[in-house]
Image (cartoon, rainbow, N blue to C red):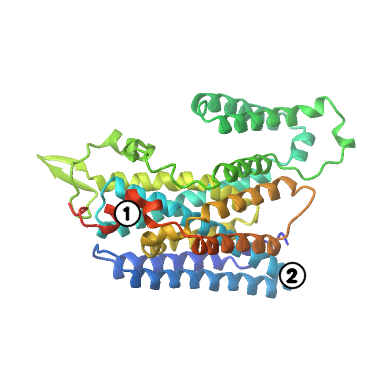
Amino acid sequence: MNQNIIDLHPGLIVGFAVVIFIMLLLDLGIFNKKAHEVTSKEATIWSVIWISLSMVFSGVVYWIFNQDAGGHEIAVEKFTQFQAAYWVEKALSVDNLFVFILVFSFFKVPKHLHHKVLFWGIIGALIFRAIFIFAGVGIINVTYLSAFLTNESNTFYVIWSLIALAVIVLTFKYLREEKIFLSLGILFAVSLLVAINAKYVIDVKTVELPPINLVMTLFGLFLIYAGIQSWGSGDDDEDEDFSDTAGAKLVKKFYKISDNYDGDKFFTVQNGMRMATPLLVVVAVIEFTDVLFAVDSIPAIFAISKDPFILYTSNIFAILGLRSLYFLLANFIHMFSKLPYGLAIVLSFIGVKMLISPWYHISSPISLGIVAGVLIISVLASLVFPETKEDVTSTLDDDLTGEDLEM
């Protein structure tokens, strides 16, 4: 069960990278070499292609484990891990499309430039998701409670003591206004300090502990909170000033911003001065928005699998299909008005799964069934009890018509 697919077939990661590179090259370099407004037909074709590739890859995962790793049971477990992680990320991405629409509307991005912005946003996601997933798996592997209680190394004690103190300082400095993050940061730091000092108070060798993981426990609490907070949410970002977000501030720190777009260029020259165009600001905002999205999705998939390759590939396949899905659903986002309720249940379920995992394991097939069932019910509920487009996207009408966005 713990065999890693990379150990079985190291060439598979090369094959995955080659496929992704070729598809991105075809997408931007050939079929979308010239900036244009993506039609519903084109978006549908690319959506089918990306979903089909994802399903084929999950079949490859099943075949390899069934042939080389010892049987059908392990193969099914790995297959359903990929599927569950993929559809959780895909569902969260659909919910986040609403924010993308708001960003494009706020900056009045011409519709024919949407594809280029999303493409470079995806490139950034490829990098950041790799960092988050592989680093996250590494951190989880070294934060089991038993390791802290039994490790006699002075170096281990000093390092984790400094980490705990750093977490407290940074949490108070940067997250003082975010009460839940402040609470979770302090809880995590205190848990670390208690865990590394417990051996001086009790005889840890005589204590049998369940496989409690400090980071997974923290993630579980956060996901339950996120699920409760996201129940029925969807309008919180409508009044946000995206020009004052971290991504926009970063670009403005290094460049002066021109007043108008210059085609699909990120930089332009005005009055002999090289300046960044608003398009670069939009890309930066999308990149930082994706990082915020990862705060929900990355912890969620850690409850599904600890195999970094399965987590990364499922995540990337879901993200790569996001651009075509955006163009397909942008004008129909109101048809998914009940999705936030489904996502709230999914996030809370995954959070509970994390918390109880040391005592009770919910298998991947069961998890996939619950996630799929909740998402399907939420979509059906959206169709049976629809909200009008004006109710959900009244502030986006100008962006969706595109009549006044050409600059």
Q: Is residue 292 above or below residue 308?
A: above
Q: Residue sitting at 74 percent across and 49 percent down? A: 357
Q: What is the x, y in percent for residue 276?
A: 23, 43
Q: Which mark is residue 4?
A: none
Q: Which quadrant is the N terminus positioned in? A: bottom right
| Type of the residue with mark 1 | Val
Q: Quadrant of residue 188?
A: top right
Q: Which residue is mark 2?
A: 73
Q: What is the x, y in percent for residue 388?
A: 41, 57
Label 2 CA crowd tier, 10 Å (few <14, some 14–19, many 20+): some
Q: Is residue 37 left or right of residue 120?
A: left
Q: Say which of 158 and 2 sits in front.
A: 2
Q: Residue sitting at 61 percent across and 68 percent down? A: 9
Q: Which residue is mark 1?
A: 117
Quote the CA–CA distance across marks 1 and 2: 42 Å
Q: Is residue 275 left or right of residue 313?
A: left
| Type of the residue with mark 2 | Glu
Helix, strand or loop at mark 2: helix
Q: Is residue 185 above or below residue 73?
A: above
Q: Is residue 388 visible?
A: yes
Q: Is residue 66 above or below residue 181?
A: below
Q: Is residue 374 left or right of residue 69?
A: left
In the picture as drawn, the residue positioned furthest to the left comes out as 271
For marks 1 and 2, the one nearer the N-term is: 2
Q: Is residue 133 visible?
A: no
Q: Is residue 377 above or below residue 156?
A: below
Q: Residue sitting at 46 percent across and 47 percent down? A: 234
Q: Residue sitting at 25 percent across and 60 percent down? A: 112
Q: What is the x, y in percent for residue 128?
A: 47, 48
Label 1 CA crowd tier, 10 Å (few <14, some 14–19, many 20+): many
